[in-house]
Each structure stands twice: as structure tokens, then as C-alpha cells.
Amino acid sequence: MPQSSSQESEIIRESPKEEEPQYDYDLFVIGGGSGGVRGSRTASQTGAKVAICELPYDPISSDTRGGYGGTCVLRGCVPKKILVYGSAFSAEFEDSKEFGWDINGDITFNWKRLVANKTREILRLNGVYKKILASAKVETYEGEGKVLDAHTVALTTPDGEVKHFTAKHILIATGGRAVLLDIPGKELAITSDEGLSLEDLPKRVVIAGAGYIAVEFAGIYNGMGSKVDLIYRKPTPLTGFDEEMRAVVASNLKGRGINCHPNTNITKLEKVEGGIKVTTDKGYEIITDAVMFATGRKPNTKRLGLEKVGVELDSHGAIKVNEYSQSSVPSIWAVGDVTNRLNLTPVALHEATCFSKTVFGGQPTKPDYEFVASAVFCQPPLSVVGLTEQKAVVQAKNDILVYTSSFNPMKNTISGRQEKTAMKIIVDSATDKVLGVSMVGPDAAEIMQGVAIALKCGATKAQFDATVGIHPTAAEELVTMRTLTRRINPSGEVIKN
């Protein structure tokens, strides 16, 4: 199946049959997360008869547990952001002193209360998703779905009963699952699933990894008073993001008291008196109360029976799809993290909407991945849209113009916090179009959503410059960066600095 967005692909049609079979449903969806719910709901709105199945609810996922709402709502974006909010207050209390606030008495933090409130909220959202499906007249089932053939799904209910359903189309939206490093003692480690629901807040935490999840949880636990060691293989965290922004994030992590261990791997975990002993390839050991592996996720396909029915998977277990989200079996489609394209919740929603338009709306629609903004909720956050400087140079046909700014946020000038905000704009020299924007600093994600709209509309640097800023804000810096930092030719050579 063609997968590259640079290749044209066609919707594969099944060979016509003498008589159209009668199916139980027009669409059966396996997976009740963001993509599955959006796909089933929008398909039903076209008049299609739709059903969806999802595993029974649990805040910690497994082969047999999940819940309507999926990773983002139950054990990802939503509960994580709640914990980020909770952890951020410690810095706010500290910063408030120079703004005239005298906090008398001890300030204590109650982890159990926060986790209970978080769990109550995700339970509410689990119910909301069920109501959304009911309102859209989508039939819901609880249990594990498995594909038997191109048009048949077997559903194993929580009590072990197996039911069979036929459908003209099947949509797979089972997402991904966190994986553990394959090292001795890995059974002592937890993933982000457990990290959101620990019974007690660990006083010491070692986190392995350098992606979104690792740096976000480092900030969460650190903000709640835990001693945090962050161990990662590369020189800086957040591989794939702009290199200058990565360096700023690393500096901010250290500035907030997180112990960073770059160029380091964990080789072994052992249970010892007083905690867990973490052995590294650098020859030193760390004794800790908890070890979190945040070293990647894997598409959740192993129990679906896909290969037996001819659905092609890649080396990571992701479903191979064409530009319309169609698999190698014409009646089977897939959206979201299970395809391992661009693993973000809004992207799964977008892919699911395009799927419904294509299959049930009579409007063949390919997902558009250009200028998809994203954010890492480290503290302060990083947010980006478009190309990094490194990717822009690789793809460039013209010289690339780079504008940068680093400054002390106004709030920090009073609080005394030593934490810079950094911004970068990447521009095509020939067209003046803005190719990418990055920012590390307070409210970066909220600011970048508006910037993403501008880039989607084809904004030029001249239009940025002609925009009057909002003062006093950090965001106004985006429309006042007029001094070129460097010019880079397509060979990667800096020709003006």
C-alpha cells in the first residue's frame, strides 16, 4: 500500500459481486478513543448504520481493559494536563513572594486528593463519550473486537460470550500502548498509565526517555516535590524538535531542579532495601522509589487478527494505509495512532472525519498534515508549527531566513526566576512565506494555535511584520522580530550570520 503523502493513491474498490450481501452494519468500529468515536459518529450522521466496540473501562490499559474515550481522555492528554496544572502551583507560590504575597504557614500537597479528582473527571468524560455515541445513534458494545475476515468482527464480551457481526466497512482505531524497555528488572518499572494513578506520590522518581511523556512527567513530579532523575540517550531531550528549542527545554529542566542524565542508558533494575536500584551504562547507580519508562509506544494491533485476513502491517505493527486511510484489504480502514502517521489526538479526529467523508459522504478526502501545531507541556511549555530549522534546510530549494529571540518574560523580571522565553521564525527567502514557528515559554501552546491558522493561510514574514502587536505580551515578539539572525543556503551553509 502506498503510504507517502507525496504519492497519489486511489481508493481500492472491492470486486463487484453478483448480488450485494446484506450486512448487520454499514460500519463497525473497533476502538472507542478519539478517532473511533469521531469516525463512528460522523458516519452515522450520513445515515449509515454504525456500531462500535471498546474494552471495559480502567484507568490503566491492558490487553483486556480500556474504556470509551481512549488514551487521550482516560490516560493521556486530559489527565496529564490536570496533573500539569496541579504541579505548576509550586512555582507560582515561589514566584508570588516578590509580588508581595506572604504565605504564612506550611504549604502542603495532597497527591491522593488530586488523583481522586482526576479520576472523577475522566470517569465523567467516559460517560460523556458514551452519551455522544448514543445521541448519534451509534450502537455501542463492550468487549474485545477481533477481525475474522474482510467483513466480520468477533466480539468477546467481559463475561466471555462471543458475538459475531458483519459490516460493509470495518474501521480500526485501537491506538497505541506504552512499551517497557527490554532490560533485566523491567517488571519493576511503570509506564505513564500507572504514573497517572499511583496510590502514593513517590519521593524519588527515575524517568527513562526524552519525548513528550518523559519531560512532561519530569515536570509534574518535580513540581509536586519529588526528586526527579531524567535519563535519556541523546545529548538533549525531544528528538525531532528544533535543536535550539531542545537546548532551551534542557536548560529549563535543570533550572527547575531536575537531574538530567544525557547520553545515558539504563541497563538494569533491581529491588533493593530502600527502593529500586537503577544501573546505567555510565557506571553509576541511582536508588529510587519509582522508575517510569517513557521510551515509546507501539500500535495496538497484536490481538486484532489483522494479518490473518491480509491486512499489511509495518515492522512496528502499525497498519499500512493509503492516503485515504484504507488498508490493503479494501473494506478495512484505520485511523489514529494505530497507523503511526502523526500521533496526535486532533490528527486522529481529522483522519476520522476524512474517512467518513470518503466512505459515506461521497467526498473522497485525504487528511492534510501540513502545519499541524503541537505542544509539549513541559514547564514552561514548548509549542511548534511547521518546519524546524533543520528540516527546512533539508527540504529547501531556496535560502532559509532564520529569526530568533530570547528574552526574560516580564513576570520573571519581578519574581527573579531565571528562565528565558525563546522564539524562532523560519522563512523561505524567495517567497517570504513563513515555514515554521517555535516557542518555549509561558502560554506557548495557546499562542501557537493562532500562529497555526496564519501559516495555514500562507502568511508571509511581511504580513507578520505588518501586524500590530498586543502589548505587553510575550506573543508580540512574533510580530517584532525584524533582525535576521542567519541566512542558510540549501547546502546547509550559513552565508549570513
Image (spheres, rainbow, N blue to C red):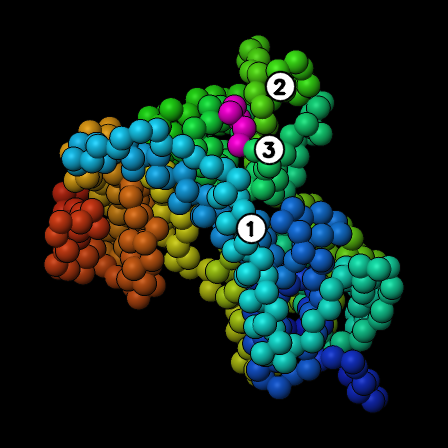
Magenta: main secondary structure: loop
* Residue 280 covered by magenta stretch: no
Picture residue at 34% right of the left edge, 51% below the top: 445
Residue with the mark numbered 3: 293
- Residue 389 at what x, y percent from top left? 34, 42
Point out the stretch of residues depicted in magenta: 201-205
Residue with the mark numbered 2: 275
Residue with the mark numbered 1: 119
Say whether disc 2 or disc 1 marks the residue closer to the N-terminus.
Answer: 1
Say whether disc 3 or disc 2 marks the residue closer to the N-terminus.
Answer: 2
Q: Horizontally, is 26 left or right of 254 in the view?
A: right
Nearest to viewer (mark 3 / mark 1): 1
Mark 3: amino acid: Phe
Q: Horizontally, is 30 left or right of 487 in the view?
A: right
Judge by depth and name the residue closer to the eye, 152 or 145: 145
In the rendered view, tell whether residue 48 sits above or below residue 226.
Answer: below
Q: Between marks 3 and 2, how big is the CA–CA gap?
A: 16 Å
Nearest to viewer (mark 3 / mark 2): 2
Most distant residue in the right direction = 161
Answer whether residue 14 is visible to the viewer in this image. no
